[in-house]
Amino acid sequence: MRVMVLVKATEESEEGFVSTPETTAMMEAMGKFNDELRNAGILLAADGLKPSSEGKRIAFDGPGRTVIDGPFAETRELVAGFWLWEVKDMDEAVAWVKRCPNPMSGPSEIEIRPLYEMADWQ
């Protein structure tokens, strides 16, 4: 089962990365966690995203397209980073997320979403 693990954005992550002793320690801890995932054969891909102020959205309405420049409102609805994992089941994904270091300096959330597989379409 493949899952996308989404690190939800915070006000702090939307300000952009600032190198401090705390963020350096957090990144080192996350690097060790990623190594554990890689060694377990679970990690397929992972990355952090720049703040939404550097992004764009394209709104579709029939044949029309509208480009919307960031930043985007509702920080709690944004994604700051992601992993793509191959796990046995959702329980295994939850167990791994529970082991994850906090990806932010304060309160944060991680969402797990299963990907559609070819068998889901048959």
Image (cartoon, grey):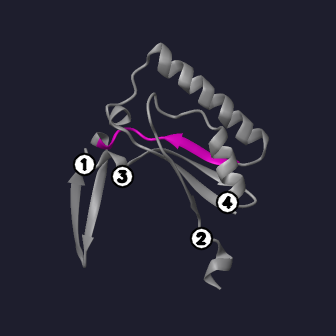
Image point (63%, 78%), residue name: 120
Q: Nearer the viewer, mark 4 or mark 1?
A: 4
Q: Are marks 1 and 3 in contact (CB under 8 Å)?
A: no
Read off the residue under disc 4.
Answer: 90
Alpha-carbon neighbours of circle 2 within 10 Å: few (<14), some, or many (≥20)? few
Task: Give coordinates of residue 99: x percent, y percent.
Answer: 66, 38
Image point (32%, 43%), residue name: 52
Relative to 106, 27 lies left or right: right
Residue 116 is marked as 2
Q: In terms of secondary structure, where does tag 4 sit?
A: helix
Alpha-carbon neighbours of circle 4 within 10 Å: few (<14), some, or many (≥20)? some
Q: Quadrant of residue 100?
A: top right
In the picture, the quarter occupied by the C terminus is bottom right
Q: Are marks 4 and 3 in contact (CB under 8 Å)?
A: no
Relative to 29, 86 lies left or right: right
Earlier sequence position, callout 4 versus callout 3: 3
Earlier sequence position, callout 2 versus callout 1: 1
Earlier sequence position, callout 2 versus callout 4: 4
Residues 95 and 15: in front is 95
**Amino acid marked by disc 1:** Ala
Image point (68%, 29%), residue name: 32
Earlier sequence position, callout 4 versus callout 1: 1
Read off the residue under disc 3.
Answer: 77
**Amino acid marked by disc 2:** Tyr
Label 1 to label 3: alpha-carbon separation = 8 Å
**Amino acid marked by disc 3:** Glu
Label 4 to label 3: alpha-carbon separation = 22 Å
Q: Are marks 2 and 3 in contact (CB under 8 Å)?
A: no
Residues 98 and 63: in front is 98
Read off the residue under disc 1.
Answer: 73
Q: Nearer the viewer, mark 2 or mark 4?
A: 4
